[in-house]
Image (cartoon, rainbow, N blue to C red):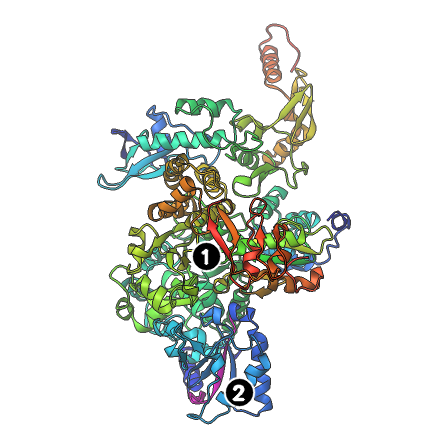
């Protein structure tokens, strides 16, 4: 994590994002969405530029950026494993999947592995409820997820042969 | 089709030519391309079908359609025109499934089609079903809105038009005044499908009559489609947005015409990327065709639409918070009045309706209010889409007329409880709703009956629970969810829910006493009465409804220190029974290494050190591990 | 228009809130997040009242600071339900602000001593009433805002440490009902939000006035030159006395 934060951020992807929307307050959430997508988080330097460009106070940008769960102010992992915590997924054991992932990766949901490879997170419903529990690994949906299926999906990221549930 | 349609006559001419060119007898393979089936690989499946069709030189249309609704059985494939239904296609052997379907069903002459038995739907009794209309899941539904989903390619404007799309718009712009369109919606009795059930026509009228600030010299009003669909367990709107985006557009166009709005926004939750993509494409195609923008269909009516995304905040489903979010602020509710109909987006009259509400509008304008009012009950007209999920055999999207009973939905359509277990409860209305027990199964579902029973319709999530679902844990789950989603503006919701959370955690973690229940029951009405918005006002519902119908379960947690459903870790014990074959898998997988045993001999869990993580139970293939209530 | 509060018919003007009407009639309604100089917020919920438009209706609980007065409204301000609500709200606020004299006093008035709930792990005494951020937006420099959501919300500088926008006006500390914003004035130095400012001494009395940054902000807002802000009330009093003396030719004093 500290390795990631020490590297200065290349803000080149920011300019085209700012050109995409009207330069005023109403574009803020959309701009932040695009910044999050481009950088995988909201770098501080980028947010300062956004505040200037949209002519809104830094305090307002910070307040909006910290309100929405989708935005992260700390660098995310190169890969993301998201467990849906919707009600249908919950009654079908999503909680146990989160615990399995926390054991497997050594990080709590919401955090990133120390090598910066994987962020484990939860989300409140992706709308694939009939397939619960649902886990999304780098945008790929794993339906009727089990610990085994999730391990298999994470194999290219975490290594291991994915055949056993643990270690 | 990216040519502009110059006028109403041209639209009808195009429709007629599309219909004439369409050979209803031509074979087609419709593959569901909704999020659920895509998760099971329907994209690769569609590609394989296309390749296979080309290789065999077949004159067959391969079409990716919107969500068919029977998601757990995906990927779903329907062969037209015979409507032969296949499920779980390509899950185990994609090449083989595709080849057999093509060779046996598709390539055969009409009437000589052979079915591939292993891909057929089978009833819980084991009967195989051939046609989609006979699959119990579909047979017992009344799919008016969802009918488009299985038929059309959601990325094709032509498909929508060919199936009657934009006919209502043509009728409204060509032969009805805005007032007449509004009157039709009022007469239909349509009530909002987002949760509150407010009469749609009345809301439209408030917005239509409100004074509007002028922008560019003309009154400015907005229409908004609330596609935030935050209730966990609900995915009706996702399916409509992905499967029939033009239906939503047409509804918004009709609403804008009736109300006098010039611009609109569709606010889509960020967790629905495919819906955003399909809507964006539909809007682009509609603009190119002259169905959006200035001078729509040459009638002088002007309306344009934008898509904006949420960013992970359930509270943004509340209309004033949604407005805040569209305006570029955080999603924090405001006191009403003024209602958005009077002062909404940027202070202008704004009509906000849910996706399902909007998509009902073209049907009402096309077929008339009387037709619509003929479906449903006295107080709740039309159909409702429910997302039937949880412990039923057939999970997916269910569209039924208002007034259908819970039993009809859970048993006839849902096929009863999975794995032969016992029905315990059905939860409706999301975090604002409640849990209804078996004694309420004959309830005829509509807005008012659900509210009277202590739950609510909500957006349509219907989560079925069995004897292995702990109702105390369900109430805890909803409180934890709302704690995360509370915007934090008002004391009762922000701080009251935290305290309700402490109390619920005491209960599930074995520290609950009778005083815990007293304190919950004292705090709940304060949160309900004093909160600013519906999130806080309805937050106590799951706790109160489970206390009402499942108090015995709470008492078991308190007095017996047991979780009868086998869920709450502090109140259960995992024990290996004599069904154990000594295969050692559980001992190997146990993360705490507390299982001992020789190969081929009965294994033993050290119950004092066991953390009840559930891994042994899930890996045991001999069903040899029991979860017992109590410690 | 006429409405009744606790059975008393009272006159109200269009645009008034129930809180204004009640207070004018001497009815004591507690508030925490309300300030006459700022737009009503409706977050603390202490000011809630029960209102009915028709006698046979169930009463609706609404915040009196925001609810507009209407002809014919029937309002109750101290029913058993409302008293229970206020007591519970104050009990909840004590989990956040056990050290606030105001909250403790109000709680005691409603029969609540120490909180009966689980207190916050490290209470900051902030009740998230947002008077500070709203004051900062209204008369300050938009330097602070609420970060985070729900019960995890915290009043904060951007990125926790960016005090660049703050001008040291102290409005936030002045409006805070629980006194949880640290403002330290020592000589001419003022420290707030982790930043130390220098207040400019009054050219007449030598007492501290405002910071240069605050003066620059006021100047930008009003168009007035900054110098005019560096005079204390005492200084201005003396200046005025000197001016009068010079004009009238009486008494001692420095020339204006």
Q: Residue at x 60, y 64 (%)?
A: A149
Secondary structure, mark 2, is helix
Residue B41 drawn in magenta = no
Neighbour tally class for label 2: few under 14, some 14-19, many 20 plus, Cα within 10 Å: many
Q: Are marks 1 and 2 in contact (CB under 8 Å)?
A: no
Q: Which residue is mark 1?
A: B217
On the image, the x and y values in percent for residue A96 come to 55, 54
Secondary structure, mark 1, is loop
- Quarter of the image for residue C2 reads top left
Range of residues picked out in magenta: B20-34
Q: Which residue is mark 2?
A: B102
**Picture layout, residue B584 above or below residue B365:** above
**Picture layout, residue A157 above or below residue A112:** below
Calculate the distance from the C-alpha at mark 1 to the C-alpha at mark 2: 61 Å
On the image, the x and y values in percent for residue B464 come to 40, 59
Judged from this view, the residue extending furthest toward the top is C251
- Quarter of the image for residue C36 reads top left
Give me the disc on residue B438: none
Residue B26 drawn in magenta = yes
On the image, the x and y values in percent for residue A110 come to 62, 50
């Amino acid at each position: 994590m500290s390795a990631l934060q020490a590297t200065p951020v290349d803000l080149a992807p920011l300019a085209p994002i700012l050109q995409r929307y009207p330069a005023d307050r109403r574009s803020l959430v959309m701009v932040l969405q695009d910044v999050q997508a481009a950088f995988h988080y909201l770098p501080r330097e980028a947010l300062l530029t956004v505040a200037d460009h949209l002519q809104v106070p830094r305090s307002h940008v910070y307040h909006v950026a910290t309100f929405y769960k989708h935005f992260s102010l700390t660098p995310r992992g190169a890969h993301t494993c998201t467990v849906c915590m919707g009600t249908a997924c919950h009654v079908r054991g999503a909680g146990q999947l989160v615990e399995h992932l926390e054991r497997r990766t050594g990080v709590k949901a919401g955090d990133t592995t120390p090598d910066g490879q994987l962020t484990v997170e939860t989300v409140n419903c992706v709308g694939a409820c009939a397939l619960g529990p649902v886990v999304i690994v780098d945008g790929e949906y794993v339906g009727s997820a089990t610990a085994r299926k999730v391990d298999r999906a994470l194999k290219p990221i975490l290594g291991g042969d994915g055949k056993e549930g643990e270690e | 089709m990216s040519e502009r349609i110059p006028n109403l006559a041209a639209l009808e001419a195009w429709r007629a030519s599309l219909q004439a060119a369409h050979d209803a007898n031509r074979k087609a393979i419709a593959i569901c391309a909704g999020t659920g089936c895509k998760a099971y690989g329907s994209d690769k499946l569609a590609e394989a079908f296309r390749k296979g069709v080309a290789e065999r030189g077949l004159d067959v249309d391969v079409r990716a359609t919107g969500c068919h609704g029977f998601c757990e059985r995906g990927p779903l494939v329907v062969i037209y025109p015979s409507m032969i239904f296949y499920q779980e296609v390509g899950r185990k052997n994609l090449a083989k499934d595709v080849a057999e379907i093509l060779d046996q069903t598709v390539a055969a002459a009409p009437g000589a089609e052979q079915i591939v038995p292993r891909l057929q739907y089978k009833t819980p009794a084991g009967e195989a079903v051939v046609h989609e209309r006979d699959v119990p899941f579909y047979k017992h539904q009344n799919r008016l809105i969802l009918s488009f989903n299985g038929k059309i390619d959601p990325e094709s404007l032509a498909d929508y038009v060919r199936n009657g799309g934009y006919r209502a718009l043509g009728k409204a712009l060509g032969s009805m005044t805005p007032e007449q369109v509004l009157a039709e919606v009022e007469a239909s009795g349509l009530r909002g499908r987002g949760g509150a059930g407010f009469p749609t026509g009345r809301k439209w009228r408030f917005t239509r009559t409100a004074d509007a600030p002028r922008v560019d010299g003309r009154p400015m009003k907005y229409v908004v489609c609330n596609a935030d669909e935050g209730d966990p367990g609900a995915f009706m709107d996702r399916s409509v947005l992905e499967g029939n985006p033009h239906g939503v557009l047409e509804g918004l166009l009709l609403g804008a015409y009736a109300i006098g709005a010039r611009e609109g926004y569709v606010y889509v939750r960020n967790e629905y990327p495919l819906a955003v993509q399909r809507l964006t494409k539909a809007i682009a195609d509609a603009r190119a065709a002259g169905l959006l923008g200035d001078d729509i269909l040459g009638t002088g009516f002007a309306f344009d639409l934008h898509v904006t995304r949420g960013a992970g905040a359930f509270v943004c489903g509340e209309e004033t918070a949604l407005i805040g979010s569209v305006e570029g602020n955080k999603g924090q509710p405001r006191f009403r009045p003024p209602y958005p109909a009077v002062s909404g987006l940027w202070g202008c009259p704004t009509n906000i309706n849910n996706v399902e509400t909007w998509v009902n509008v073209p049907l009402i304008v096309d077929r008339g209010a009387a037709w619509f009012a003929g479906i449903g009950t006295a107080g709740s007209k039309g159909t409702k889409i429910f997302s039937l999920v949880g412990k039923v055999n057939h999970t997916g999207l269910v569209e039924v007329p208002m007034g259908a009973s819970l039993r009809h939905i859970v048993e006839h359509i849902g096929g009863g409880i999975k794995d032969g277990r016992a029905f315990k409860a059905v939860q409706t209305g999301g975090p604002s709703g409640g849990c209804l027990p078996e004694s309420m199964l004959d309830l005829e579902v509509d807005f008012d009956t659900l509210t009277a029973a202590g739950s609510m319709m909500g957006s349509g999530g219907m989560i079925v629970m069995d004897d292995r679902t702990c109702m105390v844990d369900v109430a805890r789950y909803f409180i934890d969810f709302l704690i995360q989603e509370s915007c934090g503006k008002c004391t009762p919701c922000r701080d009251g829910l935290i305290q309700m959370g402490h109390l619920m955690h005491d209960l599930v973690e074995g520290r609950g006493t009778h005083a815990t229940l007293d304190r919950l029951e004292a705090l709940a009405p304060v949160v309900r009465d004093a909160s600013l918005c519906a999130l806080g006002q309805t937050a106590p519902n799951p706790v109160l409804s489970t206390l009402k119908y499942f108090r015995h379960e709470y008492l078991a947690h308190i007095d017996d220190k047991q979780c009868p459903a086998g869920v709450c870790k502090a109140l259960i014990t995992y024990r290996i029974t004599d069904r154990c074959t000594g295969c050692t898998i559980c001992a190997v997988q146990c993360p705490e290494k507390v299982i001992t045993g020789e190969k081929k001999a009965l294994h033993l869990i050290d119950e004092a050190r066991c953390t009840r993580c559930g891994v042994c139970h899930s890996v045991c293939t001999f069903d040899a591990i029991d979860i017992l209530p109590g410690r | 228009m006429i409405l009744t509060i606790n059975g008393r018919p009272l006159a109200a003007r269009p645009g008034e809130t129930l809180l204004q009407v009640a207070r004018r009639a001497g009815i004591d309604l507690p508030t925490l997040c309300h300030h006459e100089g700022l737009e009503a917020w409706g977050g603390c919920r202490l000011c809630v009242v029960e209102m009915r438009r028709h006698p046979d209706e169930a009463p609706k609980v609404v915040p009196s600071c925001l609810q507009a007065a209407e002809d014919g409204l029937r309002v109750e301000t101290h029913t058993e339900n409302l008293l229970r609500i206020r007591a519970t709200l104050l009990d909840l606020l004590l989990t956040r602000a056990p050290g606030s004299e105001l909250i403790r006093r109000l709680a005691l008035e409603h029969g609540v001593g120490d909180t009966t709930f689980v207190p916050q792990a490290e209470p900051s005494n902030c009740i998230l009433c947002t008077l500070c951020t709203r004051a900062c937006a209204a008369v300050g420099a938009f330097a602070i805002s609420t970060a985070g959501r729900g019960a995890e919300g915290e009043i904060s500088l951007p990125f926790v440490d960016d005090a660049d926008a703050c001008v040291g006006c102290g409005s936030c500390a002045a409006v805070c009902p629980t006194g949880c914003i640290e403002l330290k004035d020592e000589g001419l130095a003022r420290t707030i939000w982790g930043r130390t400012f220098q207040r400019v001494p009054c050219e007449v009395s030598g007492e501290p006035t405002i910071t240069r940054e605050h003066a620059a902000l006021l100047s930008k807002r009003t168009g007035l030159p900054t110098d005019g802000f560096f005079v204390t009330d005492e200084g201005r009093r003396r200046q005025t006395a000197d001016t009068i003396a010079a004009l009238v030719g009486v008494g001692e004093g420095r020339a204006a």
